[in-house]
Image (cartoon, rainbow, N blue to C red):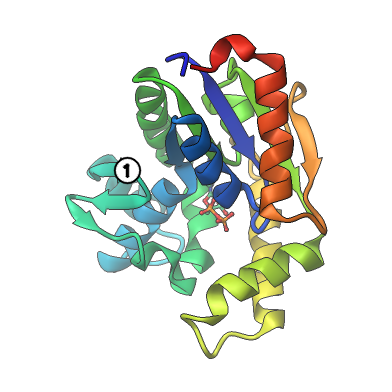
Amino acid sequence: MKTNMHIAIDGPAGSGKSTVAKRLAQRLDMTYIDTGAMYRAVTYKAIQKGIRPGDRQGIIDTAAGIRIELKGSEILLDGADVSGNIRDPLVDARVSEAASIPEVRERLVALQRQMAQKGAVVMDGRDIGTSVLPDATFKFFLTATPEERAKRRYKDLAGSNPGMDFDMVMKDMQRRDLLDSTRGHSPLRAAEDAIIIDTTGKSIETVLQEITDIVGGAGRCFTK
Ligand code: CDP
């Protein structure tokens, strides 16, 4: 793989971007970077430290002192694997607050750019095409109807959270989407040059193939 190939995949919760990005990276032999996991790790650590909602400075200090490493699909926080902990609904409830703080974003975006400098990456998030990697080789923005996105999240979460009901999942997702798309600093939106893919009613495999065809078709010179 051409070492400076960068693929940005943005979109709201439940649009399928993380699964598609991970599988695309495997298929193209590129490194997958889950930037949402980084915001989740900061939020998880703040909760662990007893930082209360609304304590901006507490969250900023947490982000400033944190060590985050991504190893495949594992996320290490100060050396410990927190891949499961960061998916907890408590983290879901507070992550958008942490992600709206400019100092937190600046710290994590700097880390994300460092990671991208090391080689070929597929990076997924909310602001990758607009802010983190504005010169990405390819930019995709995945969408789906709110109902379909909530169904996907419910399916993901229900196994490990038996008390969860569909309306709760839908409400939490809509609240997070609203916060993410209306915040002042790099809100969730498609870059002007992003290719928008509506994934409603499509399987992961179908979306993956659509993206692979675009990447392969546009850039045969990029493949090994
Ligand atoms: O998997 P899901 O789409 O539910 O969320 P995620 O990608 O793990 O991201 C969790 C949260 O982190 C989002 O709701 C955003 O508040 C924030 N985030 C962000 O602000 N910018 C990014 N590049 C990635 C995530």
Question: Is residue 136 shown to the viewer in this render?
Answer: yes
Question: Is residue 182 shown to the viewer in this render?
Answer: no
Residue 174 image-quadrant placement: bottom right
The answer to which of 149 and 98 lies nearer the viewer is: 149
Q: Does mark 1's beta carbon lie closer than 8 Å to ligand 1?
A: no
In this rendering, the answer to whether 202 lies above or below 222 is below
Which residue: 27% across, 67% down? 48
Q: Farthest front residue?
A: 224
Disc 1 secondary structure class: strand
Q: Position of residue 149 (x, y in %)?
A: 72, 62
In this rendering, the answer to whether 92 lies above or below 111 is below
The answer to which of 22 and 126 lies nearer the viewer is: 22
Residue that numbered label 1 is attached to: 70
In this rendering, the answer to whether 171 lies above or below 14 is below
Residue 147 image-quadrant placement: bottom right
The answer to which of 138 and 97 lies nearer the viewer is: 138
In this rendering, the answer to whether 115 lies above or below 183 is above
Left or right of 192? Residue 66 is left
Left or right of 144? Residue 128 is left
Q: Position of residue 31 (x, y in %)?
A: 41, 33
Left or right of 103? Residue 131 is right
Q: Amino acid at mark 1?
A: Leu
